[in-house]
Amino acid sequence: TIYLDYAATTPVDPEVVRAMANYLSGDGVFANPASEHAPGQQAAEALAVARLRVAALVGAEPGEIVFTSGATEANNLAIAGAARWRRRHGRGQRIVTVRTEHKSVLETCTALAAEGFAVSYLDVGADGRLDPAALDAVLDDDTALVSVMHVNNETGVVQDLAALATRVKAVGALLHVDAVQSIGGEPLDVRALPVDLVSLSAHKLYGPKGVGALYIRQRPRVRLCPLLHGGGQEAGLRPGTVPVHQAVGMGVACELAAQRRASDALWLKGLHQRLRESLAALGGVVLNGREDGAAHILNVSFVGIQGETLAYELQAADLAVASGSACTAALSNRAPSHVLQAMGRPAALAHAAVRFSLGRSITGHEIDTAVERIRCRLQSLRRFSPLWRD
Ligand code: PMP
């Protein structure tokens, strides 16, 4: 199978697997990092190294990183944790976010609205970008938090975080960024960007599923109410025995990502261009997103067909792509993507969308083979489509 779904998840790098194995069983260090005995201290040291590596990826200090079970939890902790703390201390009760955010952000906001928080959802343009000026209309003294993603997981659209951050800081609100898909391109650096909270996930970075991290700025100190209550691990913000092997895996994955960033970016850019140009040559292909989007994601609509039908047919041709987003798990959910709807795509075009996402080990030859398989299926699907005329 040619796998073109790296935005859904990536394979775990063999180096990451080896590092994790050392912290799982009797041959290695399996102890609880909170234990005072020697094996416990060895586990604690490994955890400290992992924390350092994750922090380095975004230019943070290790004390600003809390390990979580993934970005879904990091997003929940950032948004609910900050909103509840701020409201409790009279620092606002409005949350501002964008209609194209990941569901783990949008659903957290829905839950908080039920707790009485005021939530504002901002619209994007047809190109998926949030106009920084649109923030001005909703930001006020009552705004506790603004949550905007860096790179959209369905379209690869990159938001202008610097312009947004200036506005958020001007009213004294916190800025949370879901940076899960900020890979293979412009890195997010918390020293350069006045962002307060950043969510990360290991499994989009050739690390394991089930581990992520939340960056929490310490200068000035950002305060959160924890979601869980327990033994005080992770500065009390994420209690529970820390899964050292998972953290170690994420640490190594982050280090490899930093080392390979430049060469990955170059490689992905070439693949992206090759794929975009050969798909465009098929005719009736509409780009969903912007040409200056993240190199690893390409979302297009094939006029006259259903993206789901094409993805299903391609599966039979040993080509794995995504229609809609794998992050929205319900297969029974036949509604078109909320991201494409927010971009104002007509229903027929939104239903015709397919997301291709690229990774480190894909070759140019695989891209050519993939496009050839798409060309064949597309031709036969369009032959019977009442919506397609050559
Ligand atoms: N945010 C974005 C932008 C994502 O792409 C994903 C993964 N689908 C998540 C959050 C959730 O990450 P995790 O799978 O680690 O919970």
Image (cartoon, rainbow, N blue to C red):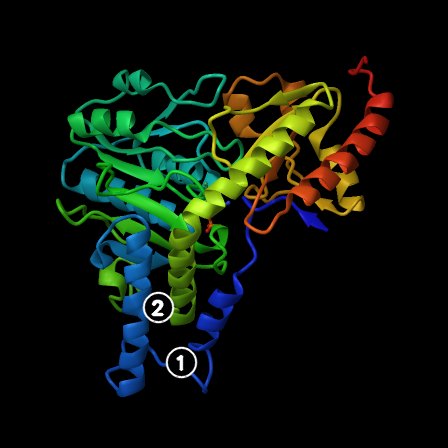
Q: Secondary structure at mark 2?
A: loop
Of marks 1 and 2, the one in the foreground: 1
Q: Residue at x 67, y 23 (%)?
A: 280
Q: Secondary structure at mark 1?
A: loop
Is residue 343 in view?
Answer: yes
The answer to whether 241 is drawn above or below residue 384 in the figure is below
Residue position for label 2? 242
Identified by mark 2, the residue type is Val
Residue position for label 1? 30
Q: Residue at x 81, y 13 (%)?
A: 390
Which image quadrant for residue 184? Answer: top left
Q: Give the image location of residue 373, x and y in percent.
A: 78, 37
Please tell me how many numbered marks the rendered image carries. Answer: 2
Is 183 situated left or right of 270 in this image? left
Closer to us: 370 or 125: 370
Q: Give the image location of residue 383, x and y in percent.
A: 86, 22
Note whether ligand 1 is within 8 Å of mark 2: no
Mark closest to the chain's N terminus, 1 or 2: 1
The answer to whether 236 is drawn above or below residue 372 in the figure is below
